[in-house]
Image (cartoon, grey):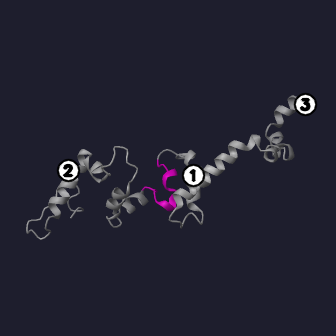
Amino acid sequence: ALAAHPDATSVADPRGTFGPAPTLLTGLLQMARTGALDSALAEADGSMSMDYTKRLLFLGDSGSYFPDLGAARQLGGDQWGMTNEPGAYPGQPWLIFVSVWYQIDPFRSSENADIQILALVAVLGLVLTLVPVIPGLRRIPMWIPLHRVIWRKWYQKHPSTM
């Protein structure tokens, strides 16, 4: 039906065989156009709700329609999801540090991947923050002088600093 009338704004049911579906779909379409559908699906306990369960369940009940739309735009979970921003290469590189863990087992198949990855990134961030004060870690550049290879032109011009 949608292929025959792609600009349709309501569902016609001349024989009345669809029950309340045409009325419901027309109402949902009107709500979506005005922006009221998102807040209707949101939790009513606050204006800054972070629980997207109802919205995701509503969209997930569409069969393969929305997943197919996302996959056609290279936004599938197996296509790096949120770090893949079409039209703005390379996307959002600051999200890769978090998003890369979703592609690796055991996080890929974990039901608690979000909290596990948050904890892992927090620990790694803390370690990186504390590198200057951890005695063994702060000596690594002295043992592996990679910085001298990177700054070799500067060291050639200033041999007294070696």
- Check the picture and name the quadrant holding the C terminus: top right
Label disc, if present, on residue 159 of the rendered structure: 3
Nearest the eye: 119 or 74: 119
Q: Residue 92 location in percent, x, y?
A: 53, 45
Q: Kindly identify the amino acid type of the residue bearing the numbered disc 2.
A: Gln
State which quarter of the image contains the N terminus: bottom left
Residue topped by disc 1: 98
Question: What's drawn in magenta, residue-wise?
Answer: 73-86
Answer yes or no: is residue 22 visible.
Answer: yes
Q: Position of residue 64 (x, y in %)?
A: 36, 66
* 150 vs 36, nearest the viewer: 36
Q: Nearer the viewer's eye, disc 2 or disc 1?
A: 1
- Residue drawn where x is 57% and y is 58% of the image: 116
Q: Amino acid at mark 3?
A: Pro
Mark number displayed over residue 30: 2
Determine the image quadrant of residue 72: bottom left
Instruction: Give yes or no for contact between labels 2 and 1 (Cβ–Cβ under 8 Å).
Output: no
Tag 2 secondary structure: helix
Tag 1 or tag 2, which sits nearer the N-term? 2
Q: Earlier in the sequence, mark 3 or mark 1?
A: 1
**From what the image shows, is residue 104 above or below residue 98?**
below
Q: CA distance from mark 3 to mark 2?
A: 73 Å
Name the secondary structure under disc 1.
helix
Q: Amino acid at mark 1?
A: Val
